[in-house]
Amino acid sequence: MALAGELSGRQPDLLGQHLERCQDCRREWEAYAALDRALGTLPLEAALPARLEQVTLRRVRLADGAEAPQRRRRWLDFALPALAATAVLVVAVRLSLQVGGQVGGQEGSQEGRRKDGRVVSAPAAPARAPSAEPQRLAARTSTPAPTAAASAGAPRRAARVLPTEPPPELTARPDLFVNLRLLRNLDKLQHYEAIQTISVDGQNGRQSSG
Amino acid sequence: MLQVQQGQEHAFPELFRRLGPRILQYVRRLVGHEARAEEITQDVFVQVYRFRQRYRPESKLSTWVFTIATNLCLNELRRPERQLRVDLWEPRTDEPQGRQDREGPPLPDPDAIDPEEGAASLELARALEAAVAALPPKQRAALLLSRLDGMAYRDVADALGTTEGAVKALLFRATHGLRDRLRDFL
């Protein structure tokens, strides 16, 4: 503390008086003072190699050059996704308006209207197209037939409905699949229903097939 | 530094020339590896430039730069692979004396006329540099910043991320360690 000049008030005087009397402390004091002087003689600065200055300044320039695109990129990071989202939203709204307008216009005049994935009949269909009757009959059969609305108003939905009749090329050649193993063994499956309905006879304990 | 913040091109090289020699010497003593010291000095000034807007004129510029240098050096000293490096500041026994002089620290008293006195000073300087290099990193940093670069305890505490009391304790232990190591010279 004394060497760092941190003593205050009467402390320096007291230290001086003690050092006059105590040889050990005086020796230590002199050693620390010599150490402090020696530290003071060490050079504070190093000679800067010219190469170090060049390399450092070049790195700083590179860092500066890298900062500018980053600054530009920073706002692009937010702007690009926002623009993309806006574009997707606009296209989606426009498509839905188009499809809704077509489907609504067609389906409003037709009987069938899809609701929750099922075909339900409209409660009131004042203006029914004459061509809708055969389609309505077809819809009642087990085979899902394209509704009038689907076939006429929504081509994309109609494309997903299975055809009711096989294509004419297959109809013209009934022997086309005759070599298939399943078809060749079809006669062995004639008792299929009987096999499925096996029941246990409770009275005599024998299995019997129906 | 304010000119650097304002983007004036000539200001940064000037800043480097003004503070570079002190920073290089400090880093060299703290890291104890010549080539690495130059790399860290580069890093210090690149960081000074990158974070130039964070500097507040209320604080002393040299304190701010020394804080960056201290952090980089202490990080370097914590790296485990550092233990494998060759310490260029250690005198090499396989070379003639002339080369050792060239690679060692500069003469502490170039104006010494008496050869014996000069040799004694040189020897003491060498021993002192070696003793400083043997101190634990934080003690070494505190000693260099406070006793050599003349920073106030509060600034040293800021640079080391500690308190003034802790700095005083570090300085006491460092001085005591140097006294023990240099008993033959003092």
Image: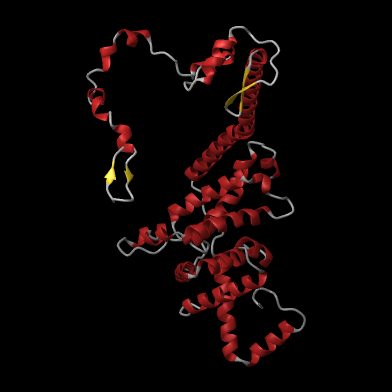
Image location (x, y in percent) of residue B131: 47, 71
Image location (x, y in percent) of residue B100: 38, 61
Work out which quarter of the rendered image holds the N terminus of chain B and state it: top right
Residue shown at 64%/54% (left/top)? B64
| Quarter occupied by residue B150 | bottom right
Residue shown at 56%/45% (left/top)? B46
Between residue B79 and residue A179, name the one nearer to us.
A179
Q: Is residue B159 above or below residue A77?
A: below
Between residue A5 and residue A67, name the one nearer to us.
A67
Residue shown at 47%/21% (left/top)? A143
Q: Residue furthest right?
A: A9
Left or right: where B58 falls relative to B63:
right
Q: Residue furthest bottom?
A: A21
Between residue A38 and residue A8, name the one nearer to us.
A8
User: Does residue A21 appear anywhere in the picture?
Assistant: yes
Q: In this view, does B127 lie above or below B34?
A: below
Q: In this view, does A127 lie above or below A70?
A: above
Q: How is the image coloured?
A: secondary structure
Between residue A84 and residue A134, name the one nearer to us.
A134
Tell me how many marks there are.
Answer: 0
Image location (x, y in percent) of residue B123: 44, 70
Q: Is residue B122 above or below residue A114?
A: below
User: Does residue A45 appear anywhere in the picture?
Assistant: no
| Quarter occupied by residue A108 | top right
Left or right: where B97 falls relative to A6:
left
Residue shown at 60%/29% (left/top)? A116
Image location (x, y in percent) of residue A122: 66, 20
